[in-house]
Amino acid sequence: MSLKGDTEDLEALVASVGVINNDIDINQKRRSDYNLPSIKGKTRNFANPALREVVIVLFYTGPYRVARKRPEIFRKQVPLPCLALVGAAYNCVLDGHSKNGSGKWYPKFTAKEYGSIYACLLKFLEQIMEDPYHGPKLVEQLESWAQIGWAASRNIDGHADGDIEDDVECLHPHLQVKLD
């Protein structure tokens, strides 16, 4: 998945992120609250529940339901490029909030404007996957999100009980990954 595609689809993504984002305290938007150390003193990168909600709505239960069209890709684990895309869309939404504060207007979510953020986030995700502690944690998280999303999509489709056969330079200092 990449940022290339129909502009209307990308704008719909940003709009859906904005709707879910309204439940988040905007004053906390760039803080790393979900990166605070766990009991073991380790951070959880990309673990914000708002990201999970957008991933599930966008790829599993929303109007596009990409997961249902490509179960071989989405059934067991959310792909890293999808998480990077959602992260870039969130960045766009947060940019809109920081510029006007109302959440009623968002910058255009285009590859030209947000492609470098997407690439940076994808690079961070790949770095996390290589880490001996954080990599397995991220895989576990992405598998969990896929399981939740798949189950939700099955409920929408009326199959609740059954089964079917089915190197980038980062120029954005506000984006961070902590591998501790």
Image: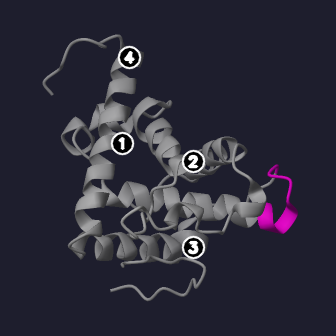
The residue under label 1 is 145
Residue sitting nearer the eye, 79 or 151: 151
Mark with earlier residue (3, 2): 2
The residue under label 4 is 155
Q: Amino acid at mark 2?
A: Leu
Mark with earlier residue (4, 2): 2
Residue sitting nearer the eye, 161 or 59: 161
Q: Residues within 10 Å of mark 2 (few under 14, many from 20)?
A: many
In the rendered image, the vertical position of residue 82 relative to residue 146, given as above or below = below
Q: Which quadrant of the view contains residue 174?
A: bottom right
Q: Amino acid at mark 4?
A: Asn
Residue 179 pos. (x, y %): 36, 78
The residue under label 2 is 13
Q: Amino acid at mark 1?
A: Trp
Name the image colouring. Answer: one colour
As measured in the structure, the alpha-carbon distance from the residue carrying label 1 to the one carrying label 3 is 29 Å
Q: Which quadrant of the view contains residue 23?
A: top right
Q: Residue at x 85, y 59 (%)?
A: 101
Magenta region: which residues? 97-104
